[in-house]
Structures are given as C-alpha cells and as structure tokens.
Image (tube, rainbow, N blue to C red):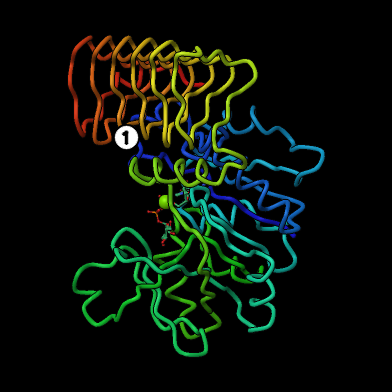
Amino acid sequence: MIAVVLVGGTGTRLRPITLDRPKPMLPIGGRPFLAHLLTRLGDAGVDHVIFSCGYLPDAIRRHFGEGADDGPRLTYVVEDEPLGTAGAIRLAAYGRVDEPFLALNGDVLADLDLRAFRRFHAASGARATIALTAVTEPERYGLVLTDTSGAVVAFREKPSTAELADVPEPYLINAGAYVLDPDVLELVPSGRAVSIEREVFPLLVGDGLHGWESTGYWNDIGTPESYLAANHHVLGAQPGDGVRVDPTAVVDPGAELVAPVLIGAEAVVEDGARVGPGSVIGAGSRVEADAYVLGSVLHERVHVGRGARVLDSVAAAGAVVGDHAELRELVVLGPAVRVAPGRVLARERLALEPADVAVG
Ligand code: GDD
Ligand code: MG
C-alpha cells in the first residue's frame, strides 16, 4: 500500500513558528507531527510513503531519511513551484501507483481507521473516497454533502455563510484523507497548479466520489489554537502518571511538575518553577527559578527567565522570555525572539524578519 503525504504548504497561518521548519515537522508532544503520522501509516500496513514536498523539504529529508527499519520506505518528490493539492498528488503518484492508494494532508492529527477506510473504498466501487469528520465550524474546511448511500452530492471548499444556509448540522467536512484509484490522476491537468478540493472533487461529484465518516479524534494542526490543542491531546494520552521527564533533563527537587507534562532532553527546570499541566519543555530549554509554564509548548533551547509566566502560549526555538515577563492567551513567539524583562503580552505573535531566522 502506498500513501502520498502532502507536505508542501508554507504553513502561513502558523507563522512565526513555521519560519524555521515546515508545519509537518512541528513537534507535537515532543515528536515531529510526521513521526506520529508515519507510526500510524506503518500500523495500517502502508509500506511506501511518498512525501510531496515544497517548502523547506530538507528539514524533512534530513530527519527521516529513507525511513526506519521497521517503518514504511520513504520517497521525496520536491516541486519547483507549488502545484496545488491535486498537482502535487499527481507529480508524486503518477507512474508509481497501479492500485488504489492513500493521499493525506500532512497536517491532520487523527485517529482514522485507515484499514477500514480502504475496505470501504474497495466495497463501494468508488473511484475516490474522502474521509469525513463532523465539525461545528466548517468555514475553514471543505464541506461535503452526501446522500444516504454515501455518494458525494456536493463539495464546497471554505464554504461561505450563504453556502451553509441550506445545510443541516452536523457539518461533515473533508478530513484531509483520500483513497484514490490511479485513473483519478488522469483528471489532473499537468503544467499548472491544480486544487483537488476546488477542481477535481467537483468533477467527480456524481461520478464515483464517496464519503466515509470517521468519528475518532480529528484535528488540523494548522493554526496556533489547534497546534496547542494537538499537543494537549497527545500529552493527555501519555501512559503512566502523565509526567514524562527525559533521563538527561535536570529538574530541581524544588520544582513542581503537574501532569500531563513532558520535559525534553537536556532541559533544565529550576527551584520553585511550576511546569504543566499541558506543557512541553523542548530539548535544551531552561525554565528558571519561580517561573511558571502552564498549558504551553516550548520548542528547543527556549529560555524562560526567573519568575516569568508563560500561559497557553507557544515559543519557537531559541526564544527568550525575560525575567518576570508574562505571556498569556496564546502568545506565539517566533524563533530567537526575545521578550524584554517584565513585559506583559497577550494574544500576540512576535517574529524576527524571516531573513534573520536560521532555518533548521
Ligand atoms: N506539495 C504540496 N504542494 N503540498 C501542498 C500544496 C502544494 O501546492 N498546497 C497545500 N499543500 C499541503 C499542505 O502542506 C497541507 O499538508 C495540505 O496540503 C493541506 O493544505 P492546507 O493549506 O493545510 O489546507 P487547509 O487546511 O486550508 O484545507 C484542507 O484541509 C482541510 C482539512 O484539514 C482542505 O483539504 C480541506 O478541504 C480540508 O477540510
Ligand atoms: Mg490544513
């Protein structure tokens, strides 16, 4: 079984934490998002994953190489120009697939039963099957309407209020996972950007396009809110007492760790500091004395000064929060950003110019 994974997007809505790495490499519960996805794909019997890359492809290739011995084989196809979701799938899969294959958005953390999904596709006789999930706010997604047999009768990408008016709840949306017959690739014109959502699915409505509903956990990590929520979800599923400390981390006996929490390799948590619930301290980061890091995700080598407060926020690699500064209500710090001592920030995104950010 082959899976094409789309990882070419620029992660605009997640800036500035996507300035130094592509969205699929963002850590979720201390592991890159793609590591979670590859585990799931391997468990579902996928033996070959083709990454369709565009933005910062080397970060992905350097990390995963040709794949782990016990996981799927990995191939990288890099676009010169963004080809859109369908163009990217075509470039990655054309000539490499001769049976139904999976195509996945590379930013969805989900408990999809991929084996059941494939079985459904084979049994329904569909040419293309879209995994569906129910949401309350469909505007950010692709709305899918089906008849009672599961055949798709309409696909509306990023629906407007008017396009939602006649649609009863629950709203079923495109979960970002497809099983496609190889002949679907013939519907994708080459030589220009083509969106599967806006151009290919509408062509297939009434002509072999089916929906398959999944009820498990589902989250597109593409905004700061949902990125933080994905981390909380993974932390909440940690085995044991929910307090995970890397053996190379140094946590002062006078510090307090509140589950669920994860302290990464060579991180330091000083006396009187309080970390968690819902926090990840990235490798090599330091939380100084009496500082609080609650509900927050720190990437690598972040420095939180003495007595500082980091609440429900995200900090990219090398960021510095000055002594007694306070971040709350989803502040997002880009790579190497420094917050002055004592400064109080709420709901802000701070970044250095992209040119000043070391890409790694
Ligand atoms: N290679 C490549 N080239 N990948 C791309 C390109 C491209 O030109 N454009 C987007 N991608 C990748 C992104 O990296 C991401 O993994 C995936 O395709 C989807 O792009 P997003 O930009 O995250 O789309 P979205 O979240 O607004 O909407 C999509 O996902 C929703 C579910 O999360 C659509 O598929 C919606 O219909 C869907 O509901
Ligand atoms: Mg997305």
Residue 11 locus on image (x, y percent): 40, 40
In the visual, does 72 lie left or right of 272? right
Q: Is residue 137 above or below residue 19?
A: below
Is the residue 201 above or below the residue 354 in the image? below
Q: Which residue is at 59% across, 70% downward?
A: 184
Secondary structure of the residue carrying numbered label 1: loop
At 41% across and 42% down in the image, what residue appears? 227
Q: Nearer the viewer, residue 283 or 203?
A: 283
Find residue 154 and report its horizontal and vertical position in percent: 38, 79
Where does the N terminus fall, quadrant-wise?
bottom right
In the rendered image, the residue lying farthest to the bottom is 148
x, y percent for residue 73:
76, 44
- Residue under label 1, please give it: 312
**Quadrant location of residue 310?**
top left
Residue 345 place in picture, x, y as percent = 19, 25
Looking at the image, residue 193 lies above or below residue 276:
below
Total label count? 1
Indicate if the residue with disc 1 has its beta carbon within 8 Å of ligand 2.
no
Pick the residue in front: 65 or 185: 65
* Neighbourhood count class around disc 1 (C-alpha, 10 Å): few under 14, some 14–19, many 20 upward: many
In the rendered image, which quarter is residue 68 located in?
top right
Q: Three-letter amino acid code at disc 1?
A: Asp
Looking at the image, which residue is at 52% across and 21% down? 360
Rendered position, 186 above or below 339: below
Q: Residue furthest front?
A: 254
